Amino acid sequence: MEIITLIALILAYLVGSIPFGLVFGRLAGVDVRSAGSCNIGATNVTRLVGKKFGIITLICDASKGAVPMLVAQALGAELNLVMGCGAAAFTGHCFPIYLKFVGGKGVATALGVFLFLDRPAVIAGITVFILLVWLTGYVSLGSMAATLVVSAMIWWLHGVGVLFYLACFVTFLVIVKHHQNIGRLVRGEEKSMWRKK
């Protein structure tokens, strides 16, 4: 691996590792790692400190996925390296070096990555996400289903290739990071947005 490629991937990982949810939670006086779902993602930030900080966290976490790819492309990197930077940023969010590799579930950062790479697939994924959350109230279920749909759409639109492998990697990791949610869904204990407190 060339030194420039390695540096680009490391920088993308470090950008992806920035824990915006933790930062904005602390600005509101809450450590999001110790309340709610104890996750640094936008959903838990929204639950604990309100929609404003939740939306800002979502935008920033998505930007972590897109910005390293935009910079790499602007500097003339080949598409494989551009996608590699997206994968590195996504990995950084899930396993941030700044938080001893305990990070978020990667959905918002994956959104940024695929908004850059394949908007039609993202539109399909968001549609499924909205539909499932509206029907069930389960954000976790909508998130996992959306990533599966994005992978399926990329396969359908582009066939099997580097982009499809990236989508499969992201989908796999998102589902792995949701393993506790899967357990709660199976047991009927998952929190629904529509369930009365």
Image (tube, rainbow, N blue to C red):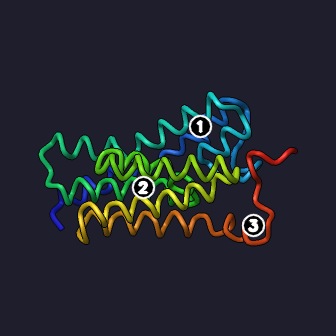
Q: Which mark is residue 127?
A: none
Residue 17, position as x, y percentages in the image: 46, 50
Secondary structure, mark 2, is helix
The mark closer to the camera, 1 or 3, is 3
Q: What residue do we see at 77% from left, 54% from top?
A: 191
Q: CA distance from mark 1 to mark 3?
A: 28 Å
Secondary structure, mark 1, is helix
Residue 108, position as x, y percentages in the image: 49, 47
Q: What residue do we see at 67% from left, 68% from top?
A: 182
The mark closer to the camera, 2 or 1, is 2
Residue 21 sits in quarter: top right
Give the residue pinned by disc 2.
90
Give the residue pinned by disc 1.
23
Q: Is residue 181 left or right of residue 174?
A: right
First in sequence, mark 2 or 1: give its number: 1
- The quadrant of the rendering that contains the N terminus is bottom left
Q: Is residue 188 left or right of residue 150?
A: right
- Density class for disc 1 (Cα within 10 Å; few <14, some 14-19, many ≥20) is some
User: Mark 2 belongs to which amino acid?
Assistant: Phe
First in sequence, mark 3 or 2: give its number: 2
First in sequence, mark 1 or 3: give its number: 1
User: Mark 3 belongs to which amino acid?
Assistant: Arg
Give the residue pinned by disc 3.
184
The answer to whether residue 32 is above or below residue 90 is above
